[in-house]
Amino acid sequence: MATKPDTDRSTSRVRLRLTLATQVGEGIDGYILGGLGAVVPAVTTALNMSAWMVGLIGSSALVGIFIGGPLFGWFADRYGRRIVFLTDMLIFLVGSVAQFFVQDAWQLFLIRLLMGIAIGGEYAIGAPLLSEYAPKANRGRLLASLEVSWYVGYMVAFAVGYALVTVPDGWRWTLASSTVIAVVCVSLRGGIPESARWLLSKGRRAEAQALIDRFGMDIDVATEVADAEPRNSLRALFTKEHIRSTIFASTFWAALVLPYFAISTFYPQVLATLGLGDDALAGSLASNGFAVLGVAVGCLLVEKIGRRKLLIPPFWITAVALAVVGVWPNAPIAVVVICFLVFSFLNAASSALTAVYPLEVFPTSIRTTGVGFATAMSRVGAAIGTFLLPIALTQVGVGFTLLIGAAVLAIGGLVSQFLAPETTGLDLSHAVRAAHKAPV
């Protein structure tokens, strides 16, 4: 029998490997999305793309996420975490290599669509698997740090794209450079064991207990077994037991990202419309910088102040910030900039919870399906906001447009006020039960 120090070392090794495999996976999501943004002009010229095709390719990953989140989530709940965790990254690897050899725009669209499906799958499986191994004391901070990895991957991709802009076929090398990251991630994921919590949810108690003993995991076995959901995981999301969690996870996530993706995508246009003129680009860069700082602060605070305090007050404050500019579009530049910086910082700080809350409100048997569905709904919100914002700017003006964004944030705050549970410091199975009760 292994001694406790041996068990502790085994636990530390598997958690470290799983953490690295998940962090790199989240980073490659951002890298793949950011890499295209950096080379759009070069790709447009090289493949002789129309504006319509540029938009189609730009949205292909978003469509793929909408498909991949629920699909991979369902597979992971039905067939296990480990196989989906590895398969998902193999798709990234194949797609990364294939991008180098595209000859026309439709090929690139199909490859990016496939990679978007894999990104959706990564959201559905990566963080949930990590949560099922994470200790309750720092589970929130560990999961929230995944958002930092996404931002880092996004920014690194832009840096690579600009560094290769003058190289012959630089856009091909930029898009294909994610191959290196995918190879590293596949090697890390090859040795990851199955989730003991998932095995318990499937009645495979002996296998689960062997993993629990091997890695010294602190799992409430009785609660995990009692909360196993025998019904189809997708249908179960809309039953009386779980509809509360489904509404909460989908609504708060969509309400966070709808105004963020819409405004951040068109920051220069929004700020120029508000009268910043030549300062619009600087303002958009500052706002994005504050967003990175905000998500880092969110990681630090998630265990200190609790989930609800990190989510609900920022919803109301950011709603007020956008509303101020909405009703006072001719405000002094300082007021406009401060309001947008407050929005960027606090919205990003709360976004750290998108990698935490959805994993804590669904039981193990339907966790990845629930996370995948919430991911899909959040991307519907992002797509709606990104599509409608430029139209709204020209049709109803910047003031009314920002008031719509404020209203979305207020809805997120209201839903969270009534449905968001406090799960800080709870075992994962106990956090799920807390989600079924009214907040304190």
Image: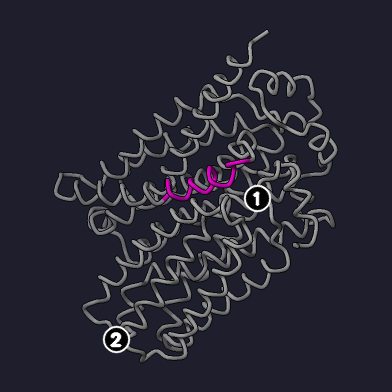
Query: Is residue 147 within the magenta segment?
Result: yes
- Relative vertical location of residue 407 with respect to residue 412 in this rendering, above or below: below
Q: Is residue 250 left or right of residue 409?
A: right
Badges 2 and 1: C-beta atoms under 8 Å apart?
no
Callout 1, which amino acid? Answer: Thr
Q: Please state the horizontal and vertical placement of residue 419, each as a whole percent of the image.
A: 72, 64
| Residue 228 location (% of width, % of height) | 81, 39
Q: Quadrant of residue 44?
A: bottom left
User: What is the quadrant of the C terminus in the image?
Assistant: bottom right
Q: Residues within 10 Å of mark 1 (few under 14, many from 20)?
A: many
- Pinpoint residue 129: horizontal percent, then vertical percent: 61, 37
Identify the image quadrant of residue 422.
Answer: bottom right
Residue at image position (85%, 38%) is 226
Looking at the rendered structure, the secondary structure element under dot 2 is loop
Cα distance, mark 2 to mark 1? 43 Å
Give the colouring mode of the picture.
one colour
Give the magenta-colored segment's residue range.
137-150
Give whichever of 60, 439 is nearer the camera: 439
Q: Residue at x 67, y 32 (%)?
A: 80
Disc with the residue nearer the chain's start (2 vs 1): 2
Label the magenta part by its dominant secondary structure: helix
Q: Residue placed at 58% from the left, 21% from the top?
A: 8
Secondary structure type for disc 1 = loop
Q: Which residue is mark 2?
A: 275
Three-letter code for the amino acid on which mark 2 is drawn: Gly
- Please identify the quadrant where the N terminus is shown: top right
Furthest toward the top, the residue is 1
Residue 387 x %, y %: 47, 71
Q: Which residue is mark 1?
A: 424
